[in-house]
Amino acid sequence: MSDRPGAPDEGGAAGGFGGRLRSAFDRHGQLCVGIDPHSFLLADWGLADSADGAREFGLRVVDAAVGKVGIVKPQVAFFERYGAAGFGALESVLAAARAAGLLVIADAKRGDLGTSVEAYGQAWLTPGSPLEADALTISAYMGVGSIERPMRLAEETGKGLFVLAATSNPEALAVQTATLLVGARAGKSVAASIVEEVGEWNAAQAGRKNTTDGTPATGGTESINGVPVGSIGLVLGATVDFGAFGIDLAVGDPATPILAPGFGHQGAKFGDLGALYGPSAPFAVVSASRSILQAGPDGIAEAIRAQASEVFACRA
Amino acid sequence: MSDRPGAPDEGGAAGGFGGRLRSAFDRHGQLCVGIDPHSFLLADWGLADSADGAREFGLRVVDAAVGKVGIVKPQVAFFERYGAAGFGALESVLAAARAAGLLVIADAKRGDLGTSVEAYGQAWLTPGSPLEADALTISAYMGVGSIERPMRLAEETGKGLFVLAATSNPEALAVQTATLLVGARAGKSVAASIVEEVGEWNAAQAGRKNTTDGTPATGGTESINGVPVGSIGLVLGATVDFGAFGIDLAVGDPATPILAPGFGHQGAKFGDLGALYGPSAPFAVVSASRSILQAGPDGIAEAIRAQASEVFACRA
């Protein structure tokens, strides 16, 4: 492990989250490797079920990922089990990944109101903070308006957010397809209303920047396939029937980035990326965890290489 | 601070979360003191905006609370800002509060699926874990079924959960009042479906225990006003119009405990507890944070004493 934290990649793009994402996609394609130190995986890897074991696991995954993919996604819950020591391990993993030029999505699914959710944003999206990541997953059960403070912070710091919208688990269907009765999006589903609201936020931010600067804020290096990309994304599971949720996958201006779990172990096939996400496929972070991590410490580098190639070949 | 972590209170009741809650209510009434180390409060208290400052703040609130209230609620977001060091501070505060016999609700609003949400449960609800609390707030945007593993863990370890149902912020209204189209609760609102599903879980657990043991599991010391109390509760904000959400406040068997934020700074009056929560008022944890914490280090003990008396006088 002498090369840890790994030779820096070609370096991140300047500017906003869209630029970092485009840079990662350009260099390595759309695969994102999950960092999930389950107890059973730690045992398989010959590591202790402890904060130190989780740190070692995470650093080895980072080592294996560098140069083969552009994005990693630590699942915070597995570190949180060990309390402060687990967060210490996570800090090491986040720092190693970012130092190596990987884009890091902290999968923490935080959510709250007012100054509390603002504090979550500060924890994960503030440059120089101990848990600094490039993006954070977040829940809007209390409305997209409830997470406005971290959305604003992400815009200010060039970070990203992925808001839970439509998830793959069957128990989610009833809540996420429920129909709004009140407000500007009455008649839409809960999930579709979040998709729309995030799209409108990204459009308003782009408009605001264009107005104040006189120059397009999300053009140039911040675009993918020539389309500018917003900072606030969505979690849209790969096994979701988007039609049944009333979700429109048309690409907005700017495009909304998508975090797409559900590949590999959970059943979706990389080859179906275009069919699943339609016109939004080029903006999808294709996330796989267990199907890669189960390869073990000796097989993970090859597993990442093989799956990254497969995803790259499916590029829209 | 020589008496830190405070002389143990009369000690927690054995058994499940309902028993701990009833014991806290019996001794001190229904007030719960929030532990929210905002930056502005740390400054007002003459403390550093750091993990050490947050630890000192939390320990002083615990000291002031012991003997006057039975329940405290640390807001995890304000500790998470400082990363691992902040969780170290939170561990100190949790341990001091529990050692002093306070019932501790970790206000973390976690949520996820499968083994990830199971890991969050393990982090907060496992006896002996570094972040052990007595109860945890949790989000069910992915369906109540998505949090079944921590619900089961809470039952096994005698801990509690409070599931977000209806919150006080205006941006929550559209999502939480949306109408389910599919599933067993089609036609209900999102919030009402969560209320029902949690009530049915508590009833099923009580029935299961009665069947396997032959003895009522939630009777005796686990009851409040003679009604047994379940382990899985709800977050129902005090400023919510429950009728508009289609929420029935009738008491189930067992009763569902309620975490009731929205008092004090957020506008609800203690004197309206009965009017707001109706028959469920005796099962409500009445939470106040800023209105107490703003009294400062010299005034907080008296502020807690005064507000606890006021809440006690309003007892249903």
Image (cartoon, coloured by chain):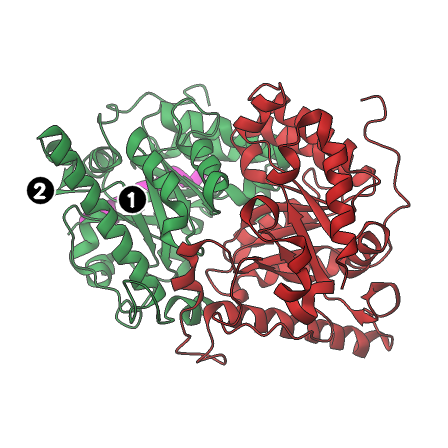
Chain colours: A green, B red
Q: x, y (%) of residue B74?
A: 64, 40
Q: Is residue A145 above or below residue B200?
A: above
Mark 2: few/some/many CA within 10 Å (<14, 14-19, 20+): few
Span highlighted in magenta in the image: A297-314
Q: Is residue A134 above or below residue B139?
A: above
Residue B155's tag is none
Q: Which residue is mark 1?
A: A232
Magenta stretch: includes residue A310: yes
Q: Residue at x 74, y 52 (%)?
A: B311
Left or right? Give the position of B64 relative to A313.
Answer: right
Q: Residue at x 36, y 64 (%)?
A: A190
Q: Give the mark toward the camera: 2 or 1.
A: 1
Q: Residue at x 81, y 76 (%)?
A: B210
Left or right? Give the position of B221 relative to A64.
Answer: right
Q: Which residue is mark 2?
A: A226
Q: How far is the residue under mark 2 from the one under mark 1?
A: 18 Å
Q: Are marks 2 and 1 on the same chain?
A: yes
Q: Nearer the viewer, residue B209 or B174?
A: B174
Residue type for callout 2: Gly
Secondary structure mostly seen in magenta is: helix
Secondary-structure class at tag 1: strand
Give me the chain letter of mark 2.
A
Q: Is residue B170 above or below residue A257?
A: below
Q: Is residue B256 visible?
A: no
